[in-house]
Structure formats: structure tokens, C-alpha cells
Image: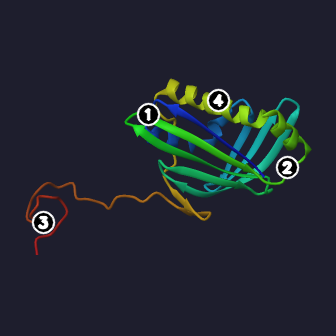
Amino acid sequence: MTTIEEAVRVAVPARTAYNQWTQFRTFPRFMTAVREVEQVRPSLTRWVVALGPLRHEFTAEIVEQLPDTCVAWRSLDSRHRGEVTFLEETPGRTVVTVHIRFGRPGPVTRLSDACGVTRRVVRSELTHFKEFIEGLGQEAGGWRGTIRNGHVRPTESEPPRSRVPGGPWADPAGHAGGLIG
């Protein structure tokens, strides 16, 4: 089993980096090896990647996703699994780390491992992500739901609040929407 870990520091908050990373369909705009990504469901994506004459299509299940923290996946063909984490070092500066573990290596995987090609591609694609998100300065969207063990939990909304300030229905602390009992 081969494991690759690469990291890049980006000059944006963790929330911005994470939100952009969740926009999988934009990956071909900045990642040269990613040709196409289709978001089938919140926890299922189809990928087409190519490097030179080599082309690979796979489906990945997102097994864990925590806003501003991590996205973890596994390919349904069992060839790899991975995780990307977002750690805000200082306000406006985040370390994005990618861990990928390859399972059943075929002859092409063994050759690319021996030459360090896969590691260089991951490092290069992370650099492209850095240039892309820093060039935008803000995310082009984001998905804020949570996925645990492959089960999707939509974004939790805030409870509705009254827009009427004060009045006899206000709570003693002055928050709209409470009742004095």
C-alpha cells in the first residue's frame, strides 16, 4: 500500500478554502489531471482523471465531511482512499493537507510510485488549488452539510427568530422572540 501526503499553505481562511474544495465540479478549472467531476449525490462523485495517455474513471463515496475541517472519501473500485484537511494557522492563512492511500497497485501505479510521479502530481495540483483560491480571494460556492459514515446530514439551519423588536413578548434579556412567563 502506498501513502502520499502533501500540504500547501493558502492565504485564505479555512472556511473559504473548505467551501471552494467542496465545489468538485470546478476542479477541472485548476487541476490539470482532473478532466471531469460529476456530483451524483452529496456523498457520491464520478471522476475522470488523465495524465498523458493514461486515463482513469472512478466513482468516489464521501464518507466523512465536516465543514471547515475535512473531506474524506473512498473510491468504489477500492483503488484508493483519501482525506483533505483544513487547519487555519492564523486568521486568513490555512494549511490544506491531502492524504491519499492506494490499495491494489497495478503495474502503472507501481511504475508511477517508483518514479515519484503520483506524489509530484498531487503536489502540483495542490499548488494549482492555492493559485486558484488566492486569485479568487473568495470561494465560488460551498456546501455546508455534514457527512458521517457516508450518511448525509444537511446544513443545520438557525431557529426562526422574531423580527419584531421589544414588546411584551420579548424576553427579559431583550432578545426578540421570547415570552415572559
Residue 138 % position (x, y): 46, 32
Residue 161 % position (x, y): 26, 59
In front: mark 4 or mark 2? Answer: 2
> Going 89% across and 41% down the picture, which residue do you hit?
108
Q: Secondary structure at mark 1?
A: strand
Vertical comparison of 49 with 148: above or below: above
Question: What's the mark number on residue 30?
Answer: 4
- Residue extending farthest to the front is 114
- Residue extending farthest to the right is 107
Question: On the rendered structure, is 7 left or right of 164?
Answer: right
User: Which amino acid is tagged 2?
Assistant: Pro
> Going 62% across and 33% down the picture, which residue do you hit?
126
Label 4 vs label 3: CA separation? 53 Å
Label 3 vs label 1: CA separation? 44 Å
> N-terminal of the two: label 3 or label 1?
1
> Going 78% across and 52% down the picture, which residue do you hit?
1
Q: Secondary structure at mark 4?
A: helix
Check contact, mark 4 vs mark 3: CB within 8 A: no
In front: mark 4 or mark 1? Answer: 1
Residue 30 % position (x, y): 64, 29
- Residue extending farthest to the bottom is 181
In front: mark 3 or mark 1? Answer: 1
User: Which amino acid is tagged 4?
Assistant: Phe
Which residue is tagged 2?
A: 105
User: Which amino acid is tagged 3?
Assistant: Trp
Vertical comparison of 160 with 179: above or below: above
Q: Secondary structure at mark 2?
A: loop
Which residue is tagged 3?
A: 169
> N-terminal of the two: label 3 or label 2?
2
Which residue is tagged 1?
A: 93
The quadrant in which the C terminus is found is bottom left
